[in-house]
Structure formats: structure tokens, C-alpha cells
Amino acid sequence: MSDDRTVDDDPYGNWELAEDDELADLDEFLRVCAELTGFDVPELHATGMAHEHHHTTLAHPVRDEHALVHLWYVGAWPGEAPSSASAHDQGLVWRTFRASPPGSAAPGHGSWAEAPRTGEQPTGEHR
């Protein structure tokens, strides 16, 4: 952030990112977004949305950290529809809940009869 402020400087997050800030650089964009979302840069890359979200962000002249977090978690700029089906399906909200977005992946026949997954990765074994 070009004006040397950080997210911690304003507990309410009411400052806007400068128009001529470093967010034009993809690596800096991802570093800032990692700090804001709580996911690290490789995790953000793993969504496959880094370039699309970067492009979406640069298309908006007024940007703040709430909009960036919303974009990564929900897959859409606040007040807009998702830029693609992938943007919605790869939203960080689903990774946070360890769930699949409704309608994006079939859970399999009879999956309703099994207990929901916990924080552990599935092993393929039935309990």
C-alpha cells in the first residue's frame, strides 16, 4: 500500500487503496490479498482465480480491503454477479467450510447417509 498504511492501522478498515498503488503488480496483489484473507499466496494461486480476480480488481477505480476479501471469498465484487462460474465455485468460503458449492460437484449416491466431514481430509474409508 503506497501510503504506508496497513490493515492494522484502521481497525474498521475504512481506508481506500490508492489508485496508483502496487496492486497493478500481480505478485503484490496476491501478497496483499493473502494478508487480508488469511490464505497464503500458494493457496490463492491454487484457486485458479488469481489472474481473473486481479483483472476484476483493476477494473474498479475505487478499491478497499472489504471488496478484495469479498471478491476472494464469494467470487464477486460487492454488488455485482460473479465474473464466472469458476469464480463462485472457487470462492474461499467453500474452502473455509470444507464444502463444495451447491450444484458444482455431485457428492455421490447415498452421501446424505454419512456423517459430514470434519476438519480432516477424507481418506476414502467408510465409517
Image: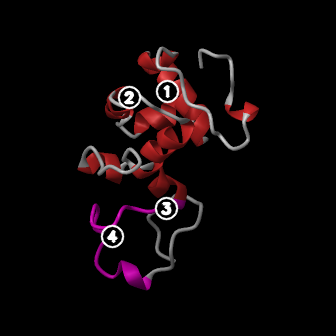
Percent from the top left, x then y, of residue 4? 68, 17
Task: Mark 2 vs mark 4: give the one in front.
Answer: 2
Q: Which mark is residue 30?
A: 1
Q: CA distance from mark 4 to mark 1?
A: 31 Å
Say if mark 2 contacts mark 1, CB within 8 Å.
yes
Q: CA distance from mark 2 to mark 4?
A: 31 Å
Q: CA distance from mark 2 to mark 1?
A: 8 Å
* x 58%, y 67%: residue: 118
The three-letter code of the residue at mark 3 reads Pro
Is residue 98 one of those drawn in magenta? yes
Q: Label 2 crowding class (10 Å Cα cut-off): few <14, some 14-19, many 20+?
A: many
Q: Which residue is mark 4?
A: 107
Q: CA distance from mark 2 to mark 3?
A: 32 Å
Q: Place residue 72 in its image quadrant.
A: top left
Q: CA distance from mark 1 to mark 3?
A: 29 Å
* x 47%, y 69%: residue: 125
Task: Mark 1 vs mark 3: give the one in front.
Answer: 1
* Camera-side residue of 123 and 95: 95
Q: Is residue 101 above or below residue 56?
A: below
Q: Which residue is mark 3?
A: 122
Q: Place residue 3 in its image quadrant.
A: top right
Q: Label 3 crowding class (10 Å Cα cut-off): few <14, some 14-19, many 20+?
A: few
- Which element carries disc 3, helix, strand or loop? loop
Horizontal placement of 88 versus 29: left or right?
A: left
- Give the magenta part as a residue range: 97-113
Percent from the top left, x then y, of residue 6? 68, 27
